[in-house]
Amino acid sequence: MSYPGKIIIWIGFASILMASRPGVADLAQQAQNPVADLISVPLQNNTNFGLGPDDRTQNILNVQPVWPFKLSDDWNLITRTIIPVTSQPLPDGSRKNGLGDTTLTAYFSPRNESSLIWGAGPVVLIPTSTDDSLGLGEWGGGLSAVALTMPGDWVIGSLISNVWADSGDDTKQDINLFTWQYFVNYNIPGGNGLYLVSAPIITADWNAGSSDRWTVPFGGGIGKIFKIGNQPVNAQVSAYYNVEKPEFGPDWQLRLQLQFLFPQ
């Protein structure tokens, strides 16, 4: 797999580009803004417990590089790529490990200062899955939008998207997936980068029956921005219980995230 090597090269290159770094406290709200003018590489590990009729465990490590581009004095383009590395339990009791399908989102976001920050743009589903059990393996697309505000020590916002993909195979299910992630962060005053977070990912599979359509988690956790040497890092741990889920969906999720920040 060439992804880890590319990421390491990218991190090193981005480090060279940095002329100065803001303080830890200044990075907190910027790191929590999905359309900030900030290069970052989040490594988000999601462990889902109680999956399927045998209550198995699924693990998904999302490598999520974010790279902003200045289009003009008025607009930025924020690209966010999600590369899932998945460990998927199979019905026969075995497990399949590999890559899932990659999602690339491009947000067009105004550069002007405003109490309401927003971005919108296309989503592309890229067929990188290494096995049928890990993804559809077909091209797809859709739209995504994000809006947030930062009153005082708070960061409050919402991100929505819908992705469509046609499998082209009667034996496989097409994709029509709605995703809504609201996020509420409270940056503790004097906490030196410590914050509380709730950012559940709500999904609806429009191709599923009404009783198996929605996954609605609820929960939260804690995070902290600190430095390893001169390298700013955003670490986070949270847990979410699925108050609504498909019949064989997971009961709850543990999320661990380590985000490397490269202020420009």
Image: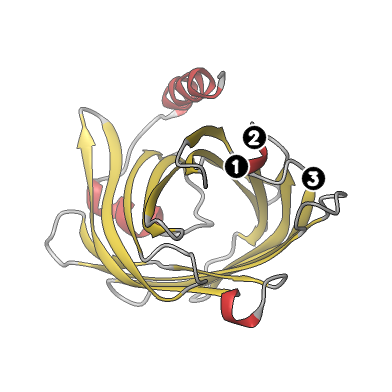
Image quadrant where residue 117 sits: bottom right
Residue that carries the numbered disc 2 in the rendered image: 131
Q: CA distance from mark 1 to mark 3?
A: 14 Å
Quadrant the C terminus occupies:
top left
**Side (left or right) of 124 relative to 79:** right
Identity, as a three-letter code, of the amino acid under mark 3: Trp
Instruction: Give the quadrant of residue 15.
Output: top left
Secondary structure under the numbered disc 1 in the rendered image? helix
- Which element carries disc 3, helix, strand or loop? loop
The residue depicted at 77 percent of the width and 52 percent of the height is: 172
Residue 110 % position (x, y):
64, 62
Q: Is residue 101 in view from this perspective?
A: no
- Give the residue at mark 3: 139
Question: CB atoms at circles 1 and 2 under 8 Å apart?
Answer: yes
Q: What percent of the width, then of the height, locates residue 38?
A: 47, 45
> How far is disc 3 from disc 2 in space, using C-alphas?
15 Å
Name the quarter where the N terminus is drawn.
Answer: top right
- Could you tell which of marks 3 and 2 lies nearer the N-terminus? 2
In-image side of 169 versus 72 (left or right): right
